[in-house]
Image (cartoon, rainbow, N blue to C red):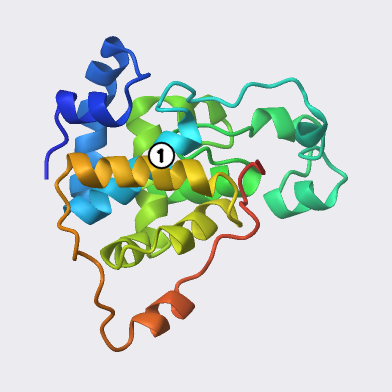
Amino acid sequence: MIITNEILKQIMPKLSPAKRTLYLPFLNRVMEEYEINTPLRSAAFLAQLAHESGEFRYMEEIWGPTEAQRRYEPPSNLAAKLGNTEKGDGKRFKGRGPIQITGRYNYERYGKLLGVDLVSNPELAATPQIAFSIAGLFWRSNGLNQLADHDDIVTITIRINGGKNGLAERKAYYNKAKAILAVPPEAGESSPRGFEAIREMTTPRQRRLDQPE
């Protein structure tokens, strides 16, 4: 399905008209490429990205550094999980893009998958053509389409966040998106045999391997 300017405006009213126009082609291309192509999948994807990026207004994490951000720097347990090994890695590999990837590990992983050197050029992760591609790739590789098919916004949140941080806002965006995209009330209610196995088999995200909230 195609997300129109008007649909995006209704789901993310805080996003400026200029940014809507800029981001829409990249958003629609990625949703088609990664099969985020049903009302349920689209609603879940847009809801999670709206929360993570403040309705696409923040493609880069604002750096203080805050006390939480200082934990991105080695040596610390969080820095080790993020793959941050050198001084300055915390800021260098801060959260970027609509899904806010964070840490040297993620930049290296998604850069290799997309054929882009994000370790040497981390700023590219905030550019529309790369940022939305990372979001789509992350979504598919973590089995989130399958979870969206079954209306499982809670497990999707855990896969993205490592916990349930911001769940109330994510649900609010999700319910609004479902209404705007005309998702039937019964959609996603059935759970066919084997769905629990899909949930267990899909690799969960390690404690955000992204920024904590």
Residue 206 in which image quadrant: bottom right
Mark 1 lies on residue: 49
Q: Nearer the viewer, residue 107 or 40?
A: 40
Q: Sort mark 1 into few (<14), some (14-19) or many (20+) by Cα contacts within 10 Å.
A: many
Q: In this view, does 166 lie to the left or right of 179?
A: right
Query: Is residue 78 shown above or below 86?
Result: below
- Count of labels in the image: 1
For the C terminus, the image quarter is: top right
> Which residue is depicted at the point 24% across and 27% down?
10
Residue 57 % position (x, y) = 44, 21
Look at label 1 and name its amino acid.
Answer: Leu
For the N terminus, the image quarter is: top left
> Residue 122: in sight, yes or no?
yes
> Which residue is depicted at the point 58% across and 32% down?
120
Residue 112 % position (x, y) = 46, 49
Q: In this view, does 200 lie to the left or right of 22?
A: right
Query: Is residue 202 shown above or below 23?
Result: below
Residue 63 % position (x, y) = 69, 22
Residue 30 in which image quadrant: top left
> Which residue is depicted at the point 65% across and 56% down?
207
Q: In this view, does 118 lie to the left or right of 63?
A: left
Q: What element carries label 1?
A: helix
Query: Is residue 13 shown above or below 211?
Result: above
